[in-house]
Amino acid sequence: MRNPIVGISLKMYQNRIDAARAFAHGIVEEVGEETKIEQFMCPGMGVIYSVAMILKESRIGLGVQNIAPTVNGALTGEFSVESLRDMRGSYAEIGHIERRTIFSETDELINQKVRVALKNDITPVLCIGEVIKTDDYAEIKDLMKKQLFLDLFQINGEEAARVILAYEPAWAVGKTSAASAVHVHQVHRLIREAVTELYDQQTAEKIRIIYGGSVSPENTPLIVSDENVDGVFVGRFGHDPKRYASIVEIVKKAKERA
Ligand code: PGA
């Protein structure tokens, strides 16, 4: 049995301390005591500390949207897992499509970050997904397997099982609608197959795969109705505590039924 999980990223939308604190207070009030669904929130870099002070009183974990590939040293402008740990954070989003494209992050760099996270007891939320929309599922599977091979290079099965995979097709991120539930279900199954082939069945059964890309309370019920979907990674359409909380409730109901 895998624990269902819901994460939310504020990207760079709520940069004012007051706004970010209000949002964090809002979700803590709505679903801060939820025990059945694991949750994490990734605030923008400038407001991490302020949000951390609010989340620490709740069951919602603190995450960051990016970490440096090493713990400490001459990396101007980067964010260290040391700071994250100090703020009692435990999740790090790695390899988001915006970082891969706008900041030219390579799979090699992403792999270093995943390793740094694992070594420091931080759960990596590794984002993978195809860039161009296609229904050629053999091609998508090859692509997912290649990304997993490169991003999880030299990471053993036990460590890989601790990673959360976020399937985020670039063509559905920041758009008006999410990928169809049928597509998500198909690709999550293929990702699990790829993990079996790269590692083994045990690892594939343990690893959690969540979907991200224009997730909303409206499209979540169908998306999470498949056993291979362990939760969702929410962006813009959850930037309101009540809407975010309704997504958590939907995932909880769906997984209770399963
Ligand atoms: P979006 O972002 O829901 O705003 O598309 C999702 C993500 O980037 O994880």
Image (cartoon, helix red, strand yellow):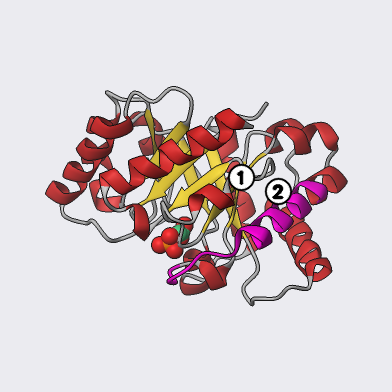
Q: Nearer the viewer, residue 170 or 43?
A: 170
Furthest-left residue in this view: 18
Residue 119 position by quadrant: top right
Residue at the far front: name it: 257
In the picture, the quarter occupied by the C terminus is: top right
Q: Secondary structure at mark 2?
A: loop
Mark 1 residue element: loop
Percent coordinates x, y for residue 108 in the rendering: 65, 59
**Mark number displayed over residue 203:** none
- Residue at the spot 23% in from the left edge and 56% down from the top edge: 14
Residue at image point 61% right, 45% down:
225
- Stretch of the chain drawn in magenta: 174-193
Q: Is residue 207 magenta?
A: no
Residue at numbered disc 2 = 152
Query: Toward the viewer: 59 or 77?
Result: 59
**188 w.r.t. 63: above or below:** below
Above or below, comparing residue 181 to residue 32 in the picture? below
> How far from the left and from the top, in percent, is residue 151?
68, 54
Going 59% across and 65% down the picture, which residue do you hit? Answer: 169
Q: Which residue is mark 1?
A: 225
Residue 153's spot in the image, x, y percent? 74, 49
Whether residue 77 appears in this view of the structure is no
Residue kind at label 1, given as amino acid type: Ser
Q: Position of residue 247 (x, y in %)?
A: 41, 44
The residue carrying mark 2 has its beta carbon less than 8 Å from ligand 1: no
111 vs 156, left or right, is: left
| Amino acid under disc 2 | Leu
